[in-house]
Amino acid sequence: MLASMHAMVLRNPGPDADFVATECPLPTPGPGQVRIRVAASSVNPLDLKLASGQVPLLPPAPCVLHGDVAGVIDAVGDDVLAFSPGDEVLGFAGGVAAHPGALADYMLADERLITRKPRRLSFMEAAALPAVFITAWQALVERGRLEAGQRVLIHGGAGGVGHVALQIARCIGAEVATTVSSDDKARAARDCGADHVIRYREEAVADYVARLTGGEGFDLVFDCVGGDNLAASFAASKLGGRIVTINARTTVDLSPLHAGSRSLEVLSILLPLTAGIGHEQQRQALGKLVELVEEGEFKVRLDERQFDFSEVAEAHRHQASGKAMGKISLVRRQFWDAAQ
């Protein structure tokens, strides 16, 4: 019986963060937990922020990052009833705080933070979706209260969260606009359901608000970018409108909110892992993910570059370059070799 496993461990957090292959003890699932034989993971901006030290929530040593996971359950805790060994699953379940992540042969996960993998999805596609779908769903539906017929602006529609948000907004029946930086990203955004594509480097906020909303502004603005873009989100919102951001690490003048009776929501999907709350909201979001995928209403956009777990540092550099189109997948070659 196995007593250890291999993992890619973060060795030097900081600007020059690197990873090293290490042998670690094989974890045993406790109450409410399952053990997943990992097939794939993916790269989220959060992973870069954790590795660089921007977000001080690293897992304990040996430090195994990445929350997105897809794989096969091989063991369950005594009180786990919803899952059994052999189930193919996906989830966002670790890589933060007290919860080691997916860059290993095996990963423990709270059963409330995973769901069964839709048959339509490969393991690579499944591993690319959990964090971005949960984020987009909670931003647009739970916090943003987006309804059919409303106008929504999604900043960064060709990115990981953005391309998912476009599709959710389309399924809701909203009129969807998005900002992009290139022709390739414009085509990708239209392919994911954008009604209007804005080249933000070429068109001022006031101009596209006038062109697309008659100067009224958008009912909901979803800011996937942050920084200086948050002020642009305020300017694009209508009077009484709503702004949801997933990146509030900035200093910004809030007076436009007061003057226009606008509301700002700041969203983090880490609370189930960092504070032990919000498991039900994540479970519901994952259930909606499965529903939309099985109905054929949803597509996964993977970047053309694919990386092995041993290449995680290079995958992080590719994410940081801003050149990725969609999600960057990470695969554990040993899983695929054993399956053949």
Image (tube, rainbow, N blue to C red):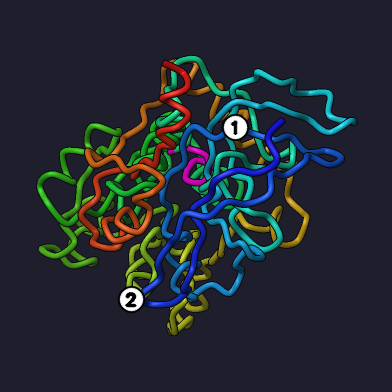
What residue does disc 2 label?
228
Placement of the N terminus among the 4 image quadrants:
top right
Q: 312 or 321, which is in the foreground?
A: 312
Residue drawn at 28 percent across, 52 percent down: 213
Which dot marks residue 37? 1
Q: Give SS at disc 2.
A: loop
Q: CA distance from mark 2 to mark 1?
A: 41 Å
Reading the chain from its start, which is encountered first: label 2 or label 1?
Answer: 1
Residue furthest to the right: 79
Please name which of the two marks, 2 or 1, marks the residue nearer to the observer.
1
Residue drawn at 69 percent across, 43 percent down: 26
| Visible residue check, residue 55 | yes
Q: Give SS at disc 1.
A: strand
Q: 59 or 132, which is in the foreground?
A: 59
Report x, y in % for residue 208.
Answer: 20, 58
Residue drawn at 55 percent across, 49 percent down: 67
Residue type at mark 2: give it: Asp
Going by the image, does 69 lie left or right of 16? right
Can you tell which quarter of the image residue 27 is in? Answer: top right
> Mark 1, residues whose alpha carbon is within 10 Å: few (<14), some, or many (≥20)?
many
Query: Is residue 224 highlighted in magenta?
Result: no
Going by the image, does 182 lie left or right of 334? left
Q: Magenta stretch?
A: 128-134
| Visible residue check, residue 145 | no
Report x, y in % for residue 115.
Answer: 64, 29
Report x, y in % for residue 141.
Answer: 56, 43
